[in-house]
Image: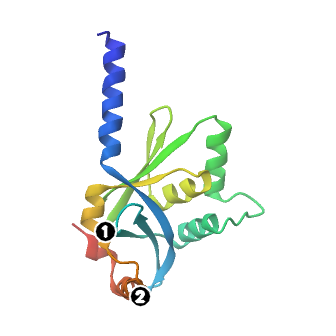
Amino acid sequence: MSEENSKNNMDKNNKEESSSKYRSVDVIGVRVELPSNQPIVLLKEQSGVRYLPIWVGAVEATAIAFAQQQVIPPRPLTHDLFKNVIDELGAALNTVYITEIKDGVFYAQLNFENGSQVSARPSDAIAIALRSGTPILANQDLLAQAGIEIPDQAEDEVEKFKEFLDQIKPEDFAG
C-alpha cells in the first residue's frame, strides 16, 4: 500500500472513530437561569432523552436566539460575519462538535470539509452552526457526564426540568 493510501485510510478511520463518539443534538432554545439571570442554551440529543444545558454569555445567547428566530439585523453581527467569511473563502463547515467540559467550562470544535479543525466556545460554534445549517454533535462522554435525562416528553416532566434549571449552577457540572 502506498504511503498516500495509508494516510487516506488512517484519516478515514479517524473520522469514523471520531464521529462514532458523537451524538446529533438539536438546539431547544435559550432561557435565563434565575436568580442569577445567566443565559443557558439547551441542547437535546436527537435520538435520546438527554438534555445538555450550557451556560453562555448574554451576547452569545442573543446571537443564538436571533439565528433560531431567523432575525436578520441591518448589519451583520459577528457570527453572521464569520459565516460570510467562510462562504466567501469557499470553505465548508461540516460539523460542530461540543467536545468536553473541564473545570466547569464547555469546549467546542468547528470541523471543516478540508479537515481543518478550530477550537471554539460552544456558544459561538452553535451560533455559527445555526446560521450555516451545520449539524451540531455532542460527545457521548460529555452527554453522560453533564447531560440530564428526561425519559418522557410529558408536560409535567418538562416543567420539572425547567424548575431544575432554575436551581442549578455551572459549578454543579464541574468534574
Q: Residue pushed farthest left?
A: 175
Do we see residue 102 in this rendering?
A: no
Count residues near mark 2 (Cα–Cα under 10 Å), then give few for <14, some for 14-19, many for 20+: few
Q: Residues within 10 Å of mark 1 (few under 14, many from 20)?
A: many
- Mark 2: secondary structure: helix
**Left or right relative to 38: residue 51:** left
Residues at marks 2 and 1 touching, judged by CB atoms closer than 8 Å: no
Tell me the number on the disc at residue 84: none
Q: Is residue 44 left or right of residue 68?
A: left
Residue 147's disc number: 1
The residue that disc 2 covers is 159
Quadrant location of the N terminus in the rendered image:
top left
Q: Quadrant of the C terminus?
A: bottom left
Secondary structure under tag 1 reads: loop
Q: Position of residue 34 (x, y in %)?
A: 43, 88
Q: Residue at x 49, y 65 (%)?
A: 27
Up the image or down, 100 lies above or below 31; here it is above
Distance of mark 2 from mark 1, alpha carbons?
A: 17 Å
Q: Judge by depth and name the residue closer to the eye, 154 or 162.
A: 154
Could you tell me residue 75's position as x and y percent? 75, 59
Number of residue marks: 2
The amino acid marked with disc number 1 is: Gly
Which of 22/112 is in front?
A: 22
Query: Where residue 50 sits in the image (x, y, percent)?
Result: 34, 68
> Which comes sooner in the sequence, label 2 or label 1?
1
Q: Residue at x 63, y 57 (%)?
A: 78
**Taking 168 as reference, is 4 above or below it?**
above
- Name the residue nearer the viewer: 145 or 1: 1
> For the view shown, which residue lies furthest in the top direction?
2
Horizontal side of residue 65 vs 76, given as left or right: left
Choose top left, top right, bottom left or bottom right for residue 44: bottom left
